[in-house]
Each structure stands twice: as structure tokens, then as C-alpha cells.
């Protein structure tokens, strides 16, 4: 797994919207439980467009797009200080479009936190291609602020037996340990799925045998974690049903839902199609998307 620097911060993207401030509140709480600092980042795209950045002639001295960007960051830093004053917080305006800025920040971050929608520099971040790019390519987990902050409830992780699903389980069990709560590992299935290129699926199959195989996939995904984290109760849920619906329903009682950036089986295409849209748009609690690093080996 990718080693995380001890001083790697939690990074949060802000754009002046209320949802960005929700992300700041979530991010600073995450920084507190991780013992990390918080880095507030505003992606400032206007210099690339050749737009005048300073105050207009005869306008107020504090006007202009650059000053507005600085105020957005200052407001977010102040909000973080209200929620968790013990967390060191810095703020920065970075020239560039939001997706490249966030992916660059993720290289040296412990976690990147985003609002579920925004305006300005982060407009549509989780509504189009940027969502896929940040969630699928960030070199650290990405946490999306959704729903209400909840201090109780389990951590829920989507399991499908893929390598990234295994990383998601590792991240999720560590998060459950940090929060002093249980982990609920959810695996869904509807019918046989290809496990690799060229797999030929049967036209007729034994439902009982298939259910037993899916139960094995789930059991293997969580095997060994109870030994490493004996303080974390791990509950397995095998559900024959639609992955997005099951995860969204589970999010109603969870304080965090964790998924891999890509998968197969019940969670195939999570960030590429309908499942991703359903979870990102309808989850009732924060959603963590894991592509790389997690608990250290």
C-alpha cells in the first residue's frame, strides 16, 4: 500500500458555497480524529482565462476576483476554527481548474474532502466528469460531504471481492476503529457476473450454489480484520438486490459509507454509471471513495 506521510494533511476544496462549508466542517472533524492538520484549497481558474483579477477602476479596494477568492478561503478557515479549534488550519488559493488542482493536492494528502455540489471553482464537481476523475484517480481516499453529521451508527463498506474493494474494507475498518463503532460489510448480488475478460456466464445456474459462493466472497473480504482490529465488531450482510439501493438504504443509519473507486460484481462500475450517481446523489451520510492507500501493512 502507499505509505502516507505522518504530516500529510486533510485537504478540503472550497468555492464559497454552503455545501463547501459543510465539507469544511466534516473535513476538520476528520482531521481531528486523525491527528492531522487541515489544508483549505480554492481552485482559482480565472487567471487561465485572461480575466482581470484586481479591483475595477474607482471600485472598492477589496474588490476583484483575487480578493474574493482570498475571502472564500478566509471564511472557510474561520469556520474550521469554530468546529475544532485544536486543529492547525492553513488556507491557499491555487491557480488552475478544480480537477487538476485537487488531483495534485491528493498526492500529498491523507484525505481529500469535497462538498456534494458547489459553485464557482468547484461548480458541478460531483455532477459530471470531475467526479469520475477525482474519485477514480486521486492518490488518496476522497470523502464526499452528504447528509447530516452523525456521531452514532456503523461504518458501512461495499464489498465485491475486487482488489479495490479490499482496500475499501481496510480503510473502513480503520475508520470504524477511529470512531469506536461497528463495521457492516455489505455484498450484493443479482445473478452471475464475469470475474475477468472472456468469462462465459451460464444460461442456467443453481441459486443456492451461487448464494453460497457470494457468501464466500464476503467472508473472505473481511477475513483477518477482526484479528488486527479486535475492538471493531464486524457484521456481514449478504443481500440479493440492487447495489445502489442497498447502499443508499444502509446509509440512512450509517455515519459513513465506504466504496472502492471501481469494482465488479454487485458494485461493478460504481463510479462509471447508475450506481455511482445513486450513491453520490442519494446517500444520507458522508461517502468515502477509496482508490489507494489505507491502513498500513
Image (tube, grey):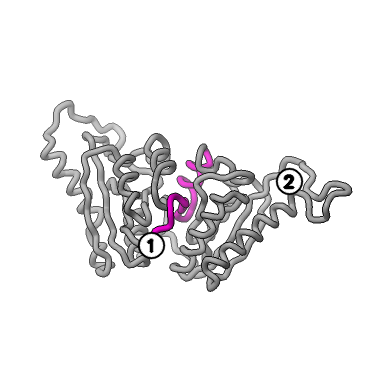
124 left or right, relative to 230:
right
Q: Which residue is mark 2?
A: 47
Q: For the residue carrying disc 2, how many other residues have a C-alpha within 10 Å: few (<14), some (14-19), or many (20+)?
A: few
SS assignment at label 2:
helix
Q: Residue at x 54, y 68 (%)?
A: 37
Q: Residue at x 48, y 41 (%)?
A: 132
Place of residue 155 in the rendered image (x, y in percent of width and height, measured from the top left): 33, 57
Q: Which residues are magenta?
A: 129-150
101 vs 40: above or below: above
When the figure is inspected, residue 229 is found, relative to residue 111, above or below; the finding is below
Nearer-the-camera pick, 284 or 3: 284
Q: Is residue 130 magenta?
A: yes
Would you say residue 180 is visible in this rendering?
A: yes
Q: Evaluate whether residue 291 shows in this view.
A: no
Residue topped by disc 1: 151
Look at the image and tell me in which quarter the C terminus lies.
Answer: bottom left
- Where does the image place residue 11, in percent across and percent down from the top left? 54, 59
Residue 252 locus on image (x, y percent):
34, 49
In the rendered image, the residue lying farthest to the bottom is: 86
- Mark closest to the chain's N terminus, 1 or 2: 2
Residue in the image at 38% along x and 62% along y: 151
- Judged from this view, the residue extending furthest toward the top is 203
Local packing at callout 1 (Cα closer than 10 Å; few below 14, some 14-19, many 20+) is: few
Picture residue at 68% right of the left edge, 50% below the top: 95
State which quarter of the image contains the N terminus.
Answer: bottom left
Q: Indicate yes or no whether the magenta region holds residue 143.
A: yes
Amino acid at each position: 500500500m502507499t505509505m502516507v506521510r505522518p504530516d500529510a494533511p486533510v485537504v478540503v476544496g472550497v468555492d464559497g458555497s454552503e455545501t463547501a462549508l459543510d465539507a469544511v466542517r466534516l473535513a476538520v472533524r476528520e482531521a481531528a480524529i486523525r491527528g492531522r492538520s487541515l489544508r483549505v484549497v480554492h481552485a482559482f481558474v480565472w487567471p487561465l482565462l485572461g480575466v482581470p483579477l484586481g479591483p475595477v477602476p474607482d471600485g472598492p479596494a477589496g474588490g476583484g476576483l483575487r480578493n474574493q477568492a482570498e475571502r472564500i478561503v478566509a471564511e472557510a478557515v474561520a469556520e474550521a476554527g469554530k468546529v475544532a479549534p485544536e486543529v492547525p488550519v492553513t488556507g491557499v488559493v491555487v491557480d488552475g481548474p478544480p480537477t487538476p488542482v485537487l488531483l495534485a493536492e491528493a498526492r500529498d494528502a491523507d484525505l481529500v474532502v469535497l462538498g456534494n455540489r458547489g459553485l464557482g471553482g468547484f461548480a458541478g464537481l460531483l455532477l459530471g466528469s470531475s467526479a469520475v476523475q477525482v474519485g477514480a484517480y486521486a492518490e488518496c481516499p476522497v470523502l464526499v460531504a452528504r447528509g447530516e453529521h452523525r456521531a452514532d451508527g456503523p461504518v458501512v463498506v461495499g464489498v465485491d471481492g475486487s482488489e479495490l474493494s479490499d482496500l475499501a474494507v481496510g480503510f473502513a475498518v480503520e475508520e470504524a476503529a477511529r470512531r469506536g463503532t461497528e463495521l457492516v460489510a455489505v455484498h450484493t448480488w443479482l445473478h452471475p457476473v464475469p470475474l475477468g475478460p472472456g468469462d462465459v456466464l451460464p444460461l442456467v445456474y443453481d441459486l443456492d450454489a451461487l448464494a453460497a459462493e457470494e457468501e464466500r466472497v464476503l467472508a473472505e473480504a473481511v477475513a483477518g480484520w477482526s484479528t488486527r482490529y479486535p475492538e471493531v465488531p464486524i457484521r456481514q450482510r449478504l443481500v440479493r438486490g440492487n447495489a445502489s439501493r442497498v447502499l443508499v438504504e444502509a446509509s440512512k443509519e450509517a455515519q459513513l459509507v465506504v466504496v472502492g473507486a471501481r469494482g465488479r460484481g454487485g458494485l461493478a462500475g460504481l463510479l462509471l454509471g447508475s450506481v455511482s450517481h445513486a450513491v453520490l446523489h442519494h446517500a444520507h451520510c458522508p461517502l468515502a471513495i477509496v482508490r489507494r492507500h489505507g491502513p498500513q501493512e
